[in-house]
Image: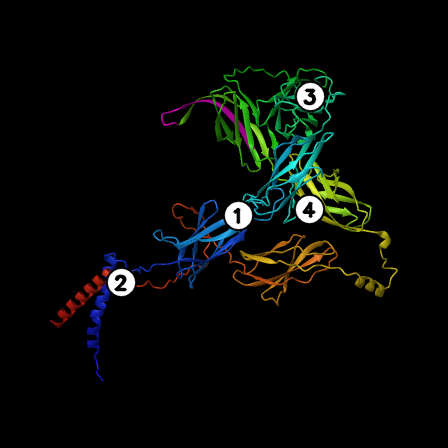
Amino acid sequence: MVKISSLKLAKLIQPLLISLMALALLSQYTGINIKSETSYKASILLAENTIAGSSGRVEIETEPLSELEVLIEDPSGKTFTFQSSSNKEGRATLTIDSTYLQKSGEYYVSVRPKDESASFSSKESFSVYPMELSESKSTLSINKNVLQGGENLEMKVALKDELFNPLAGRMVQVIPSDPSVNVYSQDFMTDENGEMKFYALIPEKEENSTVNFTVVDIESQKKLRAKPQISIIGRKSNTASNNTILLSSDSGPLDHFDISLGGQADTTLEVGDYVDVIVSALDKDENIVKDYTGTIRFSSSDGSATLPNDYSFLAEDGGSHTFSLALKFVTPGIQTINVNDTEKYSIEGVFEVEVLTEGGSSSPDYGSDFVENDFDREGDFTLISPASGSYSNNSIEVQGGAQYGYSVIIYLNEEEAGRTEVEFDESFSYSISNLEDGKYEIYVEIVETEEDESGKENILQVIETSATESVVIDSTPPELMSIEANPAEIAAIGSEVEITVLSEGGLDDVSLIFEDEIYTLEESETSGKYVGSIIMPEEAGNYSLDVLLTDPLGNDVQYRDQLILKAESQNEEVSTEEVSTEEAQNIEESIEINVGEVKGLTAMGDEESVLLSWEVPESDLIIVNYKIYYGPTPESLFATSETLDSSNSWRISNLTGGETYYFAVSAIDIEGNESPPSKSIAAMPLSKKTSVTSPPPENSEYVPYPDAAPKFQNLPPETPQTGAGTGLLITLSAISAAAFTRRRRK
């Protein structure tokens, strides 16, 4: 065995140590990067299809512990960039929030390492399908409101979901209330825009009549809320008699409005009196324009007067509408009422009335301290709309008149909302859209402007400023708080049942829809409490009841199947006191109630939750709710959750992300009978998101998004670089080591 002394060993190791030191120093001061130039690759393993308004999931394969950028492109071409990171196995899971998946259609996803020099991977696509049909968002539009026999009516159905996504490939049926009206279509189903055209042949009638249309989506068997109505002109000529204006068969285009006070022989009123107002649409020859279906707006010289809200004429109005007890004046004197068409404000009607005090005087008493001021106006300015008040639509039409050549600046809550020009006919109009519910202060300025050399419009002077109008936007329908029946749930056939509904106070209409009959409830002395009665059917069985609420602004909502009432014949009741326990058991066993098995169960994983949906089963009695069983295996469905109503979808929350769960659903009828559980299916909830912040790449909309896995603090060492830089370092190290060895030998 060869022995090496410690001194010789030190001499052998010393050059190696010097080489390593030189390598470290040179790499530090020369700036040579020893990082690996390995090309990182990333690809999309899975991009799940989903439903509009629900979240989506993307699975990515890449290098372990990599920072990633994920690019999502929606059907309109708009892009969003999310941040994520891979785990130790090189896998990353990204949950796309439902906010970015509102539109139905084809989406594209690609990924790259978080490095601006890297390129994105090839695109993978996934589909976002529309939601279920929305009865309120879907529409039926018609081209005419008044027709004569032999004419054709054109109709267009547009099926939309709750997010206004079109429903393509759906079969639709349009049902007229009059069987003699023949409705047909050249299309088989809705097109890519969710639209389908229909035509109706109007038969000749002896008398004037009306027809309304109901639209049914065949797949869901849902009826659209929109039910347009048309008027059919009969053969008999209409004449005026008994001070009643009847429809003229011929009329020209709309020229102006006629305003009169219902029940008033003269044009004198007292302060505080409520009166009817009748508005008629007339042509230049004073004929009623029977097919006018535009919208009118009221204004008055009395700024404190109570006026009717905006009103859209219906086909059954026949060009004339009465506003019952809708007008009240507050200020004595000669006052005017103005009615303008909101689309073309120059079409108007004016009515003058003398308003008296309770003492019979038309001169207001302002008091001894009142000083009357005269104001000189430079411009001729009139603001037609908006008027202070509440509106149910989410847009405001600003209309008025001013001298031609001036500009108009519209201010909304002290900020400029837009500009427009005064037209040649000395009118101006500007629409402010997409307003959220709330209060807005609006005023306009009539200004003189001049363009500079750069084309910028500069204000030379403000000619006039309007008064500020306070407008409240309220498009939210009323909320149903509770509903009760007395007697509750079970009543004798043909008997009267009292219904109590709780909602907000002062509603215009609270109605019950029960067995094709409409029952109106009246508000009691308690605000928001509405009471009325319904009559049970003459046949025994179970019947559902709907509630329709309408507020003073016209916002309405229908709550379906809010009560299930059972009609029962008293003669068929079995008294428990007259039968023994054994007989009662035999009676119960002789009645077999069938509750069908739930089928078509589907599940979609979301953040720490799973969304379930299923088909409504057949049942002898009405299904009132469902019971969900779930657990870690098909044989271990120990956990349960019951739905609150008969809706056929439910979300199970507070689940562990990344774990597999199994689900089954059973149906429960009104008597508590439960069906057998459905076949179980598996689903995996997604992990909970955590927020990160990273700067966005250029040319895309950056969205901070959570990493799919936690960041690791202790990263593995980087691979040493090879190539020209490394060769130089090794050569320098060798020279240094050789020089040191020669010096030692001397």
Quarter occupied by residue 297: top right
Evaluate if marks 2 and 4 touch, with contact meaning CB atoms under 8 Å apart. Answer: no
Report which residue position mark 4 lands on: 560
Q: Quadrant of residue 186?
A: top right
How far apart, in angstroms, are the residues tagged by discs 2 and 3? 96 Å
Find residue 722 and name its label: 2
Instruction: Report the span colored magenta.
Output: 440-455
Find the distance from the CA under tag 2 to the CA under tag 1.
Answer: 50 Å
Q: Mark 1 points at which residue?
A: 104
Q: Which of marks 4 and 1 is in front?
A: 1
Structural crowding at the residue carrying mark 1, measured as other residues with C-alpha within 10 Å and reported as few (<14), some (14–19) or many (≥20): many
Against 729, residue 746 (above or below) is below
Q: In which quarter of the image is the N terminus?
A: bottom left
Q: Which residue is drawn at 52% across and 18% down?
A: 380
Instruction: Indicate the position of residue 369 as horizontal and vertical percent values.
Output: 61, 17
Q: Nearer the viewer, residue 187 or 604?
A: 187
Amino acid carrying label 1: it is: Ser
Please name the residue that numbered disc 3 is placed on: 260
Farthest left residue in view: 746
